[in-house]
Amino acid sequence: MGAIIEAIRDKLTAAFEPTRLEVEDDSARHHGHAGARPGGESHFNVTIESAAFQGTPRVARQRMVYRALAEELAGPVHALSVKALAPGEP
């Protein structure tokens, strides 16, 4: 596991205390596209479930995640797909 995926996991865990956290490096699917890095770790899919999202609209949840990962999004991460759920949501 690379340093960027570890940083994403650590920051999301600290910020949201998730009951579920899945971080997938999807960079291989984007090889040769804009923003793709030779070593990968540029495109990610995140699924996170946390009580912190309870009663919060979907777009606001995504913005919360983007704020927590602002440093990564300003640098090595080119694309981030976020599915943010409150406990019990499908």
Image (cartoon, helix red, strand yellow):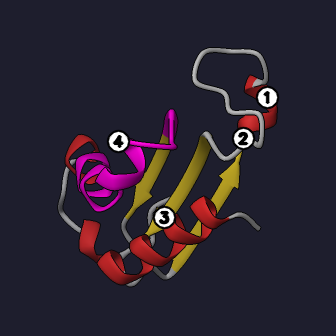
Distance between the alpha carbons at the discs numbered 1 and 2: 6 Å
Give the residue type at disc 3: Ile
Give the residue type at disc 2: Asp
Distance between the alpha carbons at the discs numbered 1 and 4: 21 Å
Horizontal arrangement in the rendering, residue 66 relative to residue 80 (left or right): left
Please give the label number shown on residue 29: 1
Over which residues does the magenta segment extend? 62-80
Give the residue type at disc 4: Ala
Comparing 32 with 64, the one in front is 32
In the picture of the structure, the residue carrying the numbered disc 3 is: 48
Query: Which quarter of the figure has residue 37?
Result: top right
Query: Which quarter of the figure has residue 64?
Result: bottom left
In the picture of the structure, the residue carrying the numbered disc 4 is: 74
What SS does tag 1 mark?
A: helix
In the picture of the structure, the residue carrying the numbered disc 2 is: 26
CB within 8 Å, label 1 to label 2: yes
Residue density around tag 4, few if under 14, some if 14–19, many if 20 or more, within 10 Å: few
Q: Nearer the viewer, mark 4 or mark 2?
A: 4
Give the residue type at disc 1: Arg
Horizontal arrangement in the rendering, residue 16 relative to residue 43 (left or right): left
Q: Earlier in the sequence, mark 3 or mark 2?
A: 2
CB within 8 Å, label 3 to label 2: no
What SS does tag 3 mark?
A: strand
Q: Nearer the viewer, mark 4 or mark 3?
A: 4
Distance between the alpha carbons at the discs numbered 3 and 1: 21 Å
What SS does tag 4 mark?
A: loop
Q: Nearer the viewer, mark 3 or mark 1?
A: 1
Q: Earlier in the sequence, mark 4 or mark 2?
A: 2
Magenta stretch encompasses residue 84: no
Question: Where is the N terminus found, in terms of image quarters?
Answer: bottom right
Distance between the alpha carbons at the discs numbered 4 and 2: 18 Å
